[in-house]
């Protein structure tokens, strides 16, 4: 019911503007909420306009280094990132990071999300070294926060997400053994929070199996592929499930070929074809 939410937030914004005037922190919060509603409905141009207005109002009423300014500035960056306007998105994230550092300190865990977004932009620019620096900075902050709250599901998933990002970078550099190391840790963390059957867990396990196979650790790669197949067989039968099983079987066949196990290769290919 996103259109209803948009209209409700716009009504709240108009009421508050009439009651307290344009330059008030409540108006800034209302503008931010309208932007969120448009962002959720993928209307990025409208969302960007409201977030930028929220930044201006919040700077004027709360001060340039207030945490709420950074919150709206981050949303500006995210919206620009989704619009693939990477240069402006990178600047927005750096502005938000500067504010967060001033307001909350350089090691505050909320900075990790900004570093991760900065890393993703560097990936788009093929600037893998800068992306690695950003992802590692995010990981250091997340690990520090996790040491204080070791059972926090939010933090555990944050660490796993950053590890997966690092795994992507290592894969781009064909450093498959390093890919396997970081993805194995990410998988363990995801299983702790999401359980063994979650789609995210199976996706990470498949990436791990790919890395192990490319590293010629064939037995472990095949074990992970087999585990994925067992979980897919338990899932609801759909066309997507059949396709996913076929892809995994094809990957297993390629591993068997590397092992010179022609019989096993043909068996997997026949199953994939069916």
Image (tube, rainbow, N blue to C red):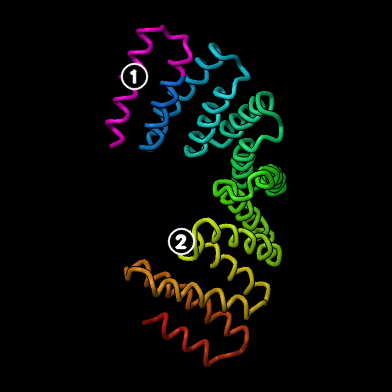
Q: Which residue is mark 2?
A: 198
Residue 268: image x %, image y %? 47, 84
Residue 124: image x %, image y %? 59, 46
Residue at 42% from the left image edge and 75% from the top image edge: 246
Q: Rounded to the nearest whole Å, what is the CA distance between mark 1 and mark 2? A: 39 Å
Q: Are marks 1 and 2 in contact (CB under 8 Å)?
A: no
Name the dominant secondary structure of the magenta segment. helix
Residue at 64% from the left image edge and 25% from the top image edge: 99
Q: Which residue is mark 1?
A: 12
Residue 89: image x %, image y %? 56, 33
160 is higher (above) or lower (below) than 47 = below
Front-most of residues 150 and 214:
150
Residue at 49% from the left image edge and 61% from the top image edge: 195
77 is higher (above) or lower (below) than 129 = above
Give the numbered dot on residue 197.
Answer: none
- Residue 270 shows in the view: yes
Report the span colored magenta: 1-28
Label 2, residues with CA under 10 Å away: few <14, some 14-19, many ≥20: few
- Residue 127 shows in the view: no
Left or right: where 129 falls relative to 163: right
Q: Quadrant of the C terminus?
A: bottom left
């Amino acid at each position: 019911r996103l259109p209803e939410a948009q209209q409700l937030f716009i009504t709240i914004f108009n009421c508050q503007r009439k009651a307290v005037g344009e330059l008030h922190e409540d108006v800034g919060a209302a503008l931010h909420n309208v932007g969120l509603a448009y962002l959720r409905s993928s209307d990025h141009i409208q969302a960007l306009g409201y977030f930028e207005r929220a930044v201006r109002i919040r700077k004027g009423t709360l001060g340039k280094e207030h945490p709420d300014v950074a919150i709206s500035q981050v949303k500006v960056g995210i919206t620009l990132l989704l619009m693939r306007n990477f240069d402006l998105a990178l600047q927005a994230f750096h502005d938000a990071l500067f504010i967060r550092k001033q307001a909350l300190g350089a090691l505050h865990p909320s900075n990790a999300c900004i570093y991760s977004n900065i890393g993703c932009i560097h990936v788009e620019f093929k600037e893998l070294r800068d992306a690695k620096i950003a992802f590692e900075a995010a990981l250091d902050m997340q690990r520090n926060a996790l040491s204080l709250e070791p059972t926090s599901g939010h933090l555990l998933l944050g660490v796993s997400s950053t590890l997966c990002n690092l795994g992507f970078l290592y894969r781009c550099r064909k450093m498959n053994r390093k890919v396997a190391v970081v993805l194995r840790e990410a998988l363990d963390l995801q299983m702790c929070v999401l359980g063994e059957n979650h789609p995210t867990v199976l996706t990470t396990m498949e990436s791990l199996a790919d890395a192990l196979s490319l590293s010629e650790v064939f037995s472990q790669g095949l074990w992970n592929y087999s585990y994925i197949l067992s979980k897919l067989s338990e899932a609801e039968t759909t066309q997507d499930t059949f396709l996913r099983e076929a892809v995994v079987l094809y990957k297993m066949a390629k591993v068997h070929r590397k092992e010179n196990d022609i019989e096993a290769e043909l068996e997997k290919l026949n199953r994939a074809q069916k």
